Image (spheres, coloured by chain):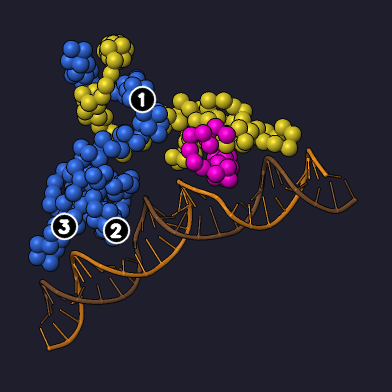
Chain colours: A yellow, B blue, C brown, D orange
Amino acid sequence: MKSVPHISDAEWEVMKVLWAKAPCTANEVIEVLEAQTDWKPKTVRTLLNRLAQKQAISYSQENRVYAYFPLVSEDECVKSETQSFLKRIYGGAFKPLLVNFLKEEQLSAEDIKELKNILEDKTK
Amino acid sequence: MKSVPHISDAEWEVMKVLWAKAPCTANEVIEVLEAQTDWKPKTVRTLLNRLAQKQAISYSQENRVYAYFPLVSEDECVKSETQSFLKRIYGGAFKPLLVNFLKEEQLSAEDIKELKNILEDKTK
DNA sequence: TATATTGTATTACATCTGTAATCCATATAA
DNA sequence: TTATATGGATTACAGATGTAATACAATATA
């Protein structure tokens, strides 16, 4: 039973690229990220290597070039990060977060409806 | 305009103690944390020092002993951490977190009622 | 074929973090 | 007064992270 490896902030950006579209060559990832960050190509390659080492991604060698793809799903990573975030900040007591943020944040009428529906379902 | 310093996981535990009750001597903090973690006293002292360095806390010298207290409020730290978490994981959107989280977590009937009321208020 | 390019692998290096231990000055006890 | 205990300051040290540069091997080019 493997849990997801810890993915750092910078690595997370790389994962997002691969979650959006995979497989992807290093150069494709680099291109996407150069538009969003000011990382040098070598930096992105380092991140790809580290992610491969920690088995968050893998690659197949097409010709001379690697085609990278995720080994862990966005969903499970988001869940895992959310869990540890909540635990860290609220020590597991998440209701204060909800109360606090429901009050603070901008939510559309539609959002609110959706959330109420979810809550409705939980009552059962 | 100072923003809150970044507080690491371990440091966060110390902050929680001081937010719950301050001022506090190092030994008081150590005592609380020894019940919750298996950190050695020296470890807690290191964390107190680091937090003081990064000006998250400060102290007054009562007699021979320091009385530590927070310089940053729990509220602003929580907000700041939540913001960067949301940005990192959800690209800034708050709703996906809520959805994810409402589905996953255990909420009492009472909690649900309270949350629904808050949502109700927001509709106006 | 010799050379330049390009993709990958290895190495670099400072800072942050987790997790303390040691050193030092002072207060306390004998 | 002298030895001891205790609180605080300094130092330690490995692994993670941000941010690359350099070395190397295979490929494309002249």
Report if residue A35 lies within the magenta region: yes
Upstream in the sequence, badge 2 or badge 3?
Answer: 2
Residue that label 2 marks: B46
Q: Are marks 3 and 1 on the same chain?
A: yes
In x, y percent, where is residue A17? 53, 30
**Chief secondary structure of the magenta portion:** helix
Element assignment for label 2:
helix
Q: Kindly identify the amino acid type of the residue bearing the numbered disc 2.
A: Thr
The answer to which quarter of the image holds residue B1 is: top left
Report crowding for label 1: few under 14, some 14 to 19, many 20 or more residues within 10 A (C-alpha): few
Q: Kindly identify the amino acid type of the residue bearing the numbered disc 1.
A: Ala
Point out which mark residue B59 bears: 3
Report if residue B4 lies within the magenta region: no
Q: Chain of mark 3?
A: B
Along the line of sight, which residue is nearer the eye, B92 or A39?
Answer: A39
Residue that label 1 marks: B93
Q: Is residue A34 above or below residue B50?
A: above
In x, y percent, where is residue B106? 29, 23
